[in-house]
Image: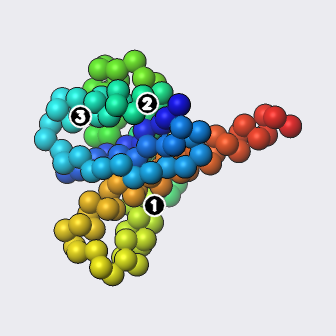
Amino acid sequence: MTILALDIGDKRIGLAVSDQSENISFPLEVLHRTNNLKDCNHIITRIEEYKIRLVVAGLPRSLDGSLKAQAEKVQRFVDTLKSKTDVPLEYWNEWLTTKEAESTVLLEADVSRKKRRQVIDKLAASLILDGYLRRHKQNETIEEK
């Protein structure tokens, strides 16, 4: 089984996938946005290619847990994606994943400004997936006890 994570922005969508055992996430790619339909079709291709069983979309929230303005755009995109696939889709709080990704990339001094954005978006998707995987592994451990 494999999970796909999405970091959905206005200009780009970062994609990351889990390994088969759903323990580790891997940055996959950055999709440059064109329109919702084409973007969804590209993601559906990845869903089929990687035999995805679940899609996790980052949902931007404020520190107090309320939805940010970008969240409505993310939800509209996800609704379009849901209408095109039977694969279940869940939201995950993406709080600070982009900032964490930026900090990580800035440590890599050899990455050009143009390439940084590419790396940041797919790394943010990977961080979203890492958080999701950690939480679900913790829940499985608790349930086993």
Task: Determine the secondary structure under disc 3.
Answer: helix
Tag 2 residue: 52
Q: Position of residue 140 (x, y in %)?
A: 72, 37
- Secondary element type, mark 1: loop
Q: What amino acid is at disc 3?
A: His
* Three-letter code for the amino acid on which mark 2 is drawn: Ile
Task: Please identify, in this view, whether the residue under mark 1 or under mark 2 is nearer the observer.
Answer: 2
**Marked residue nearer the N-terminal end (3 or 1):** 3
**Mark 1 residue type:** Leu
Q: Is residue 53 left or right of residue 79?
A: right
Alpha carbon separation for disc pair 2 and 3? 14 Å
Closer-to-camera residue (15/128): 15
Q: Residue at x 28, y 40 (%)?
A: 73
Quadrant where the C terminus is found in the figure: top right
Mark 1 to mark 2 CA distance (whole Å): 25 Å
Q: Which residue has dot 1 on it?
A: 96
Please give the name of the residue rendered at 23% of the width and 34% of the height, measured from the top-left corner. 42
Q: Position of residue 112 (x, y in %)?
A: 23, 74
The answer to whether the residue labelled 2 contacts the one labelled 3, judged by CB atoms less than 8 Å apart, is: no
Residue 28 seen by the camera: yes
Q: Which mark is residue 42?
A: 3
Judging depth in this view, the residue of 6 and 70 nearest the camera is 6
Local SS, label 2: strand
Q: Please rate how many residues cluster around mark 3, counting C-alpha atoms within 10 Å: few if below 14, some from 14 to 19, many from 20.
A: few
Residue 60 placement (x, y as % from top left): 40, 49
Callout 2 environment at 10 Å: few (<14), some (14 to 19), or many (20+)? some
Label 1: how many Cα within 10 Å (few below 14, some 14–19, many 20+):
some
From this viewpoint, which residue is outermost toward the left? 34
Tell us which disc is closer to us: 3 or 1: 3
